[in-house]
Amino acid sequence: MKAFSFIQASSLGHAAAESAAMGTSFIAGGTNIVDLMKLNVESPSRLVDVTKLGMNQIESDSHGNLRIGAMVRNSELAEHRLVKERFAVLSEAILSGASPQLRNMATTGGNLLQKTRCPYYRDVAFACNKRSPGSGCPAIEGHNRNQAILGGSEHCIAVNPSDMNVALMALGAMIHLHDGKNERAVPIQDFYLLPGGTPHQEFAMMRGEIITAVTVNAQPKGAKSLYVKLRDRASYEFALASCAAIMKISSGVVESVQIAFGGVGTVPWRANRAEQSLKGKAPTTQNFADAADAELIGAAVQSENAFKVELIKRCTVYTLSQLANGGAL
Ligand code: SF4
């Protein structure tokens, strides 16, 4: 690990001003950045600690909308009464990831910015367009079993590893960013950038901006939600495929549905086509399968990951079937 200077931010303005300098990274829980620094994947010359800026509240307004401060720890968010009662999919997604120790440290803002687990990205002996733009992508011709089938490009096929972000994608969260003077809110679907020709640019965030909060609106009355995660082992493992869904059935048809996929996309993947396919239809296994197929038309597989097409389809059908049969909150 290279030497770096450590700066304790005393205000949002201070954090924003310090982070405007090249070679500066934020640190909060440190569960991702410290790992990457040890591997020399990240080597900031300055680390700005943002943990003393507040932003650690979970608040609800009179409409049932939630504002989650960026410094709220994953464990606190997952166990919060309002989250468990009204946004169960978010609690389930967080609790399916990492370990209790990591969730105790990891923050909401940090999780949103979580880096890929692509093994080539994490090993500086290899080329990687995301780590070193223009150097190449060995995953495309190499080991790609865990890589993305949706949203990739010829320059990068790395999967987004987060569980929390899949639930937030299904919930249609807004990401609040502050530049030290003003706050702006970005829909989560616009916050994550597809790799295209610039896989090193991952977030719709400017240098000098800091995540202050995430907001989620109350979900339709009578809707049920569920997060289902499929992985190689039962715990402490990233998703091969996961599905977050919120669905309301009324008069025998799907009145509203929000679906997001994890483990298969270069970004937490909002399944817009699947949602369109399902609205107004009967909640049958065949219609759920057709909805998954509608989304997966755009899938692009590599030498080792074609199985993910069937896996995410079955994961989606199972998740929606559980919701339709009343097997979830
Ligand atoms: Fe790098 Fe992306 Fe290729 Fe992995 S998939 S080696 S992160 S460019």
Image (tube, rainbow, N blue to C red):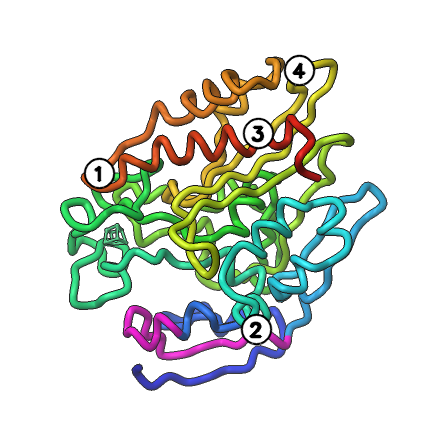
Pointers 2 and 4 in contact (C-beta within 8 Å)? no
- Foreground label between 3 and 2: 3
Q: Earlier in the sequence, mark 1 or mark 2?
A: 2
Quarter holding the N terminus?
A: bottom left
In which quadrant of the rendered image does the C terminus lie? top right
Mark in the foreground, 1 or 2: 1
Distance of mark 3 from mark 4, alpha carbons? 13 Å
- Amino acid type indicated by mark 3: Leu
Question: With respect to residue 95, does 22 lie above or below?
Answer: below
- Label 2 residue SS: loop
- The reply to whether callout 1 and callout 2 are in contact (CB within 8 Å) is no
Mark 4 belongs to which amino acid? Val
191 and 301: which one is in front? 301
Compared to residue 17, the image places residue 253 above or below, namely above
The residue where tag 4 is placed is 253
Q: Residue furthest right?
A: 62
Mark 2 residue type: Val
- Measuring 65% from the left and 24% from the top, which residue is drawn there? 256
Q: Which residue in the structure is indicated by mark 3? A: 320
Give the Cα distance between marks 1 and 3. 27 Å
**Between discs 4 and 1, the one toward the N terminus:** 4
